[in-house]
Amino acid sequence: MARISVEKNISYDANKKLYYVCMNYGKDENGKLIKKYKTFIKKSEAREALKKFEADKTKGILVIPKDTTLKEWLEYWINDIIKPNCEQATIYFYQLIIDNHIVPALGSFPIQQLKPKQIQQYYTMLINDKKLSSNTVRKHHDLLNTALKLAVRQDVLLRNPIDKVDSPKITRKEVSCYNPEQLTKLYELVKGDRLEIVVKLAGYLGLRREEICGLKWESIDFDKRIIRINSARTSVGTQIIEKSTKNESSKRTLYIQDELLEILNQEKEKQEENKALLGKEYIDSGFVVVQNNGLPYRPNRISEIFTKFILDNDMPKITLHGLRHTFASIANGKALGHSTTATTTKIYMHMFDKTNEDTLKKVAEKLKK
């Protein structure tokens, strides 16, 4: 016997002894009518479910059922939202997380059926089985949260399951820095070395590695003694890309104090000599930090050379970022310890307002003592 209609949108199957509720969601974006059925043992339960459905539909708090998987949603998010609006480095980083981790673990789940527990277990798996740090897993959390928030805004999800997930805690990374005496010693050791300009751009100005690698002569005004920081050069997988600085607040104009001005002049003269010596074999790339043939270094290569130099000269272990931190510490008069790099950046940017001539002179004076 076929189902018999007992009330509007409720029918009964005598063989199965079940009540069927027809839930009419209306039409999707393609004009297709979307209907879903739910079964109940009691008529009262069927009536209550239909009543709630109609009330939610009137309030506009329903989402049309879809079979979109997390993999499909993330593909849409990357291609239509991230790629048109983000730097290549960001796109590469997100794609790496999605392809290597999220899709293999959660990609086949329809996002409307994705539960907080599944996501929480995914984080646990990354930490326990994949041995990823909580800081790295937090990046997975932030990616998923951003992508699923969009699904809520675009009425694909009613609620974001991430809201009920405990996010991985960020642990503070201690950044080693030098005191004024150690930095002065490093300046003496590096004098005349190919790393001198790199070390002093980081130590005297607090530049990031990608800013040092992206600095061009056209951004330096020798007459006004200023450097405009507005570009960067970084590694993205096997590619090297040029881009704007980290964010708008990172674009700044810095004062060039005496010693750094002399070093920059020496480097420019050296490049002119190499250009005359090598002729057509010299590549005039326009960058400040280059090899003898004019080609810029790979950013990672700069770090490798610096690390080896520190080791060979028996200096305390430090990174180029540590020199940036050293600059901020000396300028601020104390060691900086922050829970996030964002906090550190805010303090750096406060110091780096305009040409920061007073700050740089203050650092130079401390290093002469």
Image: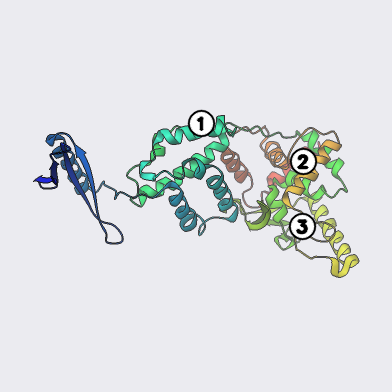
Residue picked out by circle 3: 296
Give the residue at the far bottom of this rendering.
280
Image quadrant occupied by the C terminus: top right
Q: Amino acid at mark 3?
A: Pro
Camera-side mark, 3 or 1: 1
Q: Residue at x 77, y 40 (%)?
A: 365
Q: Residue 168: x percent and y percent?
A: 51, 33
Residue at the limit of the structure toward the right, as seen here: 277
Amino acid at circle 2: Glu
Q: Is residue 337 left or right of residue 151?
A: right
Question: Toward the viewer: 38 or 129?
Answer: 38
Q: In the orientation shown, which residue stands out farthest toward the left?
A: 6
Q: Local crowd at mark 1 within 10 Å, few (<14), some, or many (≥20)? A: some
* Residue position for label 2: 365
Q: Secondary structure at mark 1?
A: helix
Residue 186 % position (x, y): 82, 39
Residue visible at 76% across and 38% down in the picture: 366
- Residue 8, given in percent of the width and then of the height, sits at 10, 48
Q: Return the x and y of residue 195 as percentages of the image width and height.
A: 82, 48
Q: Is residue 214 left or right of residue 290?
A: left
- Residue 169 shows up from this direction: no
